[in-house]
Image (cartoon, rainbow, N blue to C red):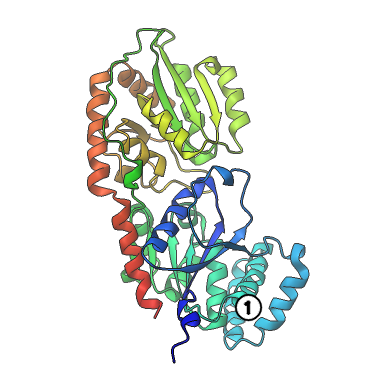
């Protein structure tokens, strides 16, 4: 007799950093798409949701279960999990993996990952056969230890910061143990292929959901000469170093004073107060509207009213960089021309003088020169907007990416 209840229990567990998070809306979209493809899972997060969680369009059915973010805040839960984990058949192997990692990373975070892995391994349903980790740094460390403890297989979805700031040895060990690694940008895939089995690395762009694509493109007519009709620049980006917002403020200050333009910035982040002060000092504060974090509908509305999307990303001092920012794909999907910088994987979506314009990173003079050109040339903006729109529709279909992720996962679910 078939146990219907057991058959319905998820064979997959998904582990993420935090859920839901506005800066990781693409994760929520992918998970909802997997559920729509009849792949059910238990969902586990290393962090509690942030203050912007309510702004996320989240339709994921799975209820997130939160691992202890800091072990000291859940001493009894962690202690009980550790004692139970010691009885798991793979605990000795997981302990050996930790002991191998410890001389190379003697931080509290490494101990935290082992503790979280004990909790995850002992709280996962018995039905789970495979664990899928979003991000190749901390979530994958937890998943790797937990999978070894439970004798399960695991896989990784790698993105940007996790690829460029994690040490080579850590990524190499995870690639060796994982069944596959999905990567959302070619630059990241190239790096990971230097560290392990290239057949495990699968380039799968996030893509743009069809619901986020425009059907009628906005006409371009503003040319920066009429103060009552300023050219509207739009930037959707967290205020962090790799987004290049310092360069953007500096470039705006270099533009001719007679040029009619305004910048609408959407996003929060640790550098926001500094950027506002820089804008005041540079004499362009009156040109900028700092809108803060906004729900997706508001982002789309701003894009639809924008003349030019600007994101002069760069490589941060800790080597962090963007993959392909989803905000760029969304701008292109609304027919808004994109001006960005040649950092990370941006060049995969923005081909200079074809589907957008690119400048070297961290060069405000070059950015200002091209900004002035595009502000004054609505015809060029219209051509770039159409080309970017066609590029997204042809090369960055989110549904195709979701199909490929589902196809990679299914053989491991029994």
Q: Residues within 10 Å of mark 1 (few under 14, many from 20)?
A: many
Q: Residue drawn 38% across and 55% down?
A: 188
Left or right of residue 380, residue 375 in this image: right
Taking the image as shown, residue 38 lies to the left or right of residue 102, namely left
Query: Seen in the image, is 205 located left or right of residue 264?
Result: left
Q: Quadrant of the C terminus?
A: bottom left
Q: Which residue is mark 1?
A: 122
Q: Name the residue nearer the viewer: 331 or 347.
A: 331
- Residue at (44, 31) in percent of width and height: 235
The quarter of the picture where residue 260 lies is top left
11 or 149: nearer the viewer: 11
On the image, the x and y values in percent for residue 69 come to 67, 60
Q: Position of residue 220 (x, y in %)?
A: 28, 20
Tag 1, which secondary structure?
Answer: helix
Task: Give how far across and how far down residue 23 sits, in percent.
Answer: 51, 46
Nearer-the-camera pick, 322 or 315: 322
Q: Is residue 179 left or right of residue 96?
A: left
- Residue 204 image point, x, y percent: 33, 58
Q: Report the number of discs.
A: 1
Q: Is residue 194 visible?
A: no
- The correct choice, above or below, for 11 with respect to 318 in the image is below
Q: Is residue 93 above or below residue 336?
A: below
Q: Quadrant of the N terminus?
A: bottom left
Residue at the (22%, 28%) spot, across then down: 383
Examine the rendering and report whether any part of residue 136 can be seen.
yes
């Amino acid at each position: 007799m078939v146990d219907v209840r057991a058959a319905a229990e998820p064979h997959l567990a998904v582990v993420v950093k935090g859920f839901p998070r506005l800066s990781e809306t693409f994760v929520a979209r992918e998970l909802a798409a997997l559920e729509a493809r009849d792949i059910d899972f238990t969902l586990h997060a290393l962090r509690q949701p942030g203050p912007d969680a309510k702004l996320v369009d989240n339709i994921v059915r799975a209820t997130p279960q939160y691992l202890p973010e800091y072990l000291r805040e859940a001493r009894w839960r962690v202690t009980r999990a550790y004692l139970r984990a010691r009885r798991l058949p793979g605990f000795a192997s997981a302990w050996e993996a930790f002991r191998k990692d410890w001389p190379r990373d003697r931080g509290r975070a490494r101990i935290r990952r082992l503790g979280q892995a004990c909790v995850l391994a002992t709280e996962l349903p018995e039905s789970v056969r495979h664990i899928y980790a979003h991000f190749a740094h901390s979530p994958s460390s937890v998943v790797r230890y937990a999978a070894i403890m439970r004798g399960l297989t695991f896989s990784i979805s790698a993105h940007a910061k996790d690829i460029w700031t994690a040490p080579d040895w850590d990524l190499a060990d995870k690639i060796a143990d994982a069944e596959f690694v999905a990567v959302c940008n070619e630059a990241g895939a190239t790096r990971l292929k230097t560290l392990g089995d290239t057949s495990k690395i699968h380039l799968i762009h996030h893509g743009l959901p069809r619901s986020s694509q425009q059907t009628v493109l906005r006409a371009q007519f503003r040319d920066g000469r009429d103060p009552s009709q300023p050219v509207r620049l739009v930037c959707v980006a967290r205020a962090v170093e790799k987004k290049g917002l310092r360069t953007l403020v500096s470039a705006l200050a270099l533009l001719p004073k007679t040029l009619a333009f305004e910048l609408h910035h959407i996003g929060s982040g640790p550098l926001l107060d500094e950027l506002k002060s820089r804008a005041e000092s540079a004499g362009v504060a009156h040109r900028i509207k700092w809108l803060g974090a906004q729900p997706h509908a508001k982002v789309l509305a701003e894009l639809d009213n924008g003349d030019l999307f600007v994101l002069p990303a760069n490589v941060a001092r800790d080597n962090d960089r963007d993959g392909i920012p989803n905000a760029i794909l969304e701008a292109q999907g609304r027919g808004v021309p994109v001006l960005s910088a040649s950092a990370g994987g941006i060049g995969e979506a923005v081909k200079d003088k074809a589907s957008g314009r690119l400048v070297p990173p961290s060069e405000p003079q070059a950015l200002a020169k091209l900004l002035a050109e595009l502000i004054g040339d609505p015809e060029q903006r219209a051509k770039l907007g159409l080309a970017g729109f066609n590029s997204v529709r042809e090369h960055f279909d989110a549904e195709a990416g979701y199909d490929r992720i589902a196809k990679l996962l299914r053989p491991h679910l029994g």
